[in-house]
Amino acid sequence: MVPNPSPKQKRIFGLERNIFFIGLTSFLTDTTTKMIYAVMPLFLLSLGATKTELSLIEGIAESTASVLKALSGWWSDKIRKNKPFMFVGYLLTAILSPLFAFAASPVQVLGIRFAERVGKGIRTAPRDSLIAASTEEGGRGKGFGFHKAMDNSGAILGPLLAAGVLLLFPGDYRKVFIFAGIPAAFGVVSILAFVKERRHTEAQKLGKIQLRDFSGRYYAFLGIVFLFTLGNSTDALLLVKAGDLGVRAAWIPMLYLVFNSVSVLFSVPAGMLSDRIGRERLIIAGYLLYAGIYFGFGQVVKLPSVVMLFALYGLYSALTDGTQKALVSDLVRQDVRGTGLGLYNSLVGITLLPASLIAGLLYDRVDNQAPFYFGAGMALLSALLMIGFYVWFSPEKNRRNAL
C-alpha cells in the first residue's frame, strides 16, 4: 500500500515534486518523439510506403511493444519500484530516435520504430503508477492532467522545431531526426537527478495476477475503451489527409502544433474538473466530441476547416487522455495499480494494430473519407456504452446496493 504524499513536502508551482519532474521528463521526451512523428508520414511516403503500410508500421510498433506495458506494470508492482523502468524506457528513446536518419526503407523504419516503442512499453505503466502514488487524495485528475499538459507542451515544441529544420533544410527529413535526440537526452537526466521513488509500507508480496484482483467496473471500462480504440487509428492519417487537401509539407507539423496547444490549455482544467464532477462525464463528452471531429474530417475540403478540426481534436485529447488513466487508477487497488494501468495501456496499444489496419485499408481501397466515418461511428457507440456504464455503476447506485 502506498501512503499519500505529505502536505508538508516542498512543492513546485503548487505541484508535488515528482509530478513536476515526471512532467518535465515527458515534456523533453515528447519534444523528441513529436519532432519525429510530425514528419514521419511524409518521410515514409518518400520511401515509397503506401497509406496501408504507413498505418501498419504505426500499428505494429505500438501494438507489439504494448504487451510490455502490462508486464512492466506487474513487475513494478512486484518489486515495489517504478524509477528503474522509467530510466530504461526513456533511455531507449533517447538513443534510438536519431537512428531514423539512417533508414533507407519502410522496413528499417519499422525496426527502429518498434525498438523505440519498446522503451515506451517499459516505462508507461510504472510512470503512471508513480504519478498516481505521488498525488494527494482528491487530486489525481489534476496530477494526470498536468502530466498530459507537459506531454503536449513537448508536442507543441517538437513540431515547431521540425518545421524550423524543414524551413532551413527543405525536404531534408533526416536532419530532423538527427536533432531530435537532444531533448530526450535531457529527459533521461531529469529522471536520474530529480524523480524520487515512493516509499512503500510493508505489503503482502504480489504473486500471480488473478481475474478477481480487478473489479467488474474495471473490466467493463476496458471493454468500452477497446471499442473506442478500434475506431481511433494512428493520428498519422490525419496528417496525410491534410496533405491530400493541399497543405504544404513544411506546414504539416504546424497542424500538430494547433492540436497540442489546445490540449495543453485544457488538460489541467479538465483533470481538475474530473476530480469535481466525476471522470465518466468528461469521457462521455470526449467521445461525443471525437465522433463529431472524425465525421468532420470525412466531410472537410477546405483548409480553415482542417485547422478548426485539429483544434477540437486537442480539446478531445484534454478531456479524455488523462481522465481515462485517472479513472483506471480509481478502479484498481493500490497494490495492483501498476498492473491495472499496464493492462489498460496494453489494450489501447494492441488495439491500435487492427484499428490502423482497418483505417489504412479503408483509405487505400475505398476513399479518404471512409476511415473517418468508421471512427466517428465507433466513438458514438462507445459514448452510448459509457453512458450505460455511468448509469449502471453510478456512485448513488453503489451506495444503495451496499445498504
Image (cartoon, rainbow, N blue to C red):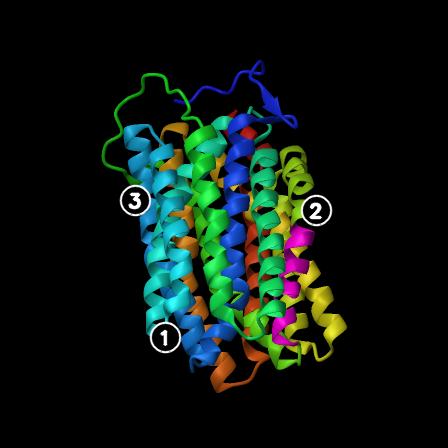
The main secondary structure of the magenta stretch is helix
* Mark 3 residue crowding within 10 angstroms, few (<14) / some (14–19) / many (20+): some
Using residue 209 as the reference point, say whether residue 123 is left or right of it: right
Locate the N terminus and report the quarter of the image it occupies.
top left
* Mark 2 residue crowding within 10 angstroms, few (<14) / some (14–19) / many (20+): some
Q: Residue at x 76, y 71 (%)?
A: 304
Percent x, y of residue 357: 42, 73
Which element is circle 2 on?
helix
Labels 2 and 1: the sequence-earlier one: 1
Percent x, y of residue 225: 48, 54
The residue furthest right is 304
Q: Residue at x 62, y 65 (%)?
A: 163
Give the number of the disc on residue 71.
Answer: 3
Does the magenta run of residues contain 12? Answer: no
Does the magenta run of residues contain 261? Answer: yes
Is residue 166 in view?
Answer: yes
Report if the CB atoms under discs 2 and 1 are less than 8 Å apart: no
The residue labelled by disc 1 is 104
- Is 226 above or below relative to 395? below
Mark nearer the viewer, 2 or 3: 2
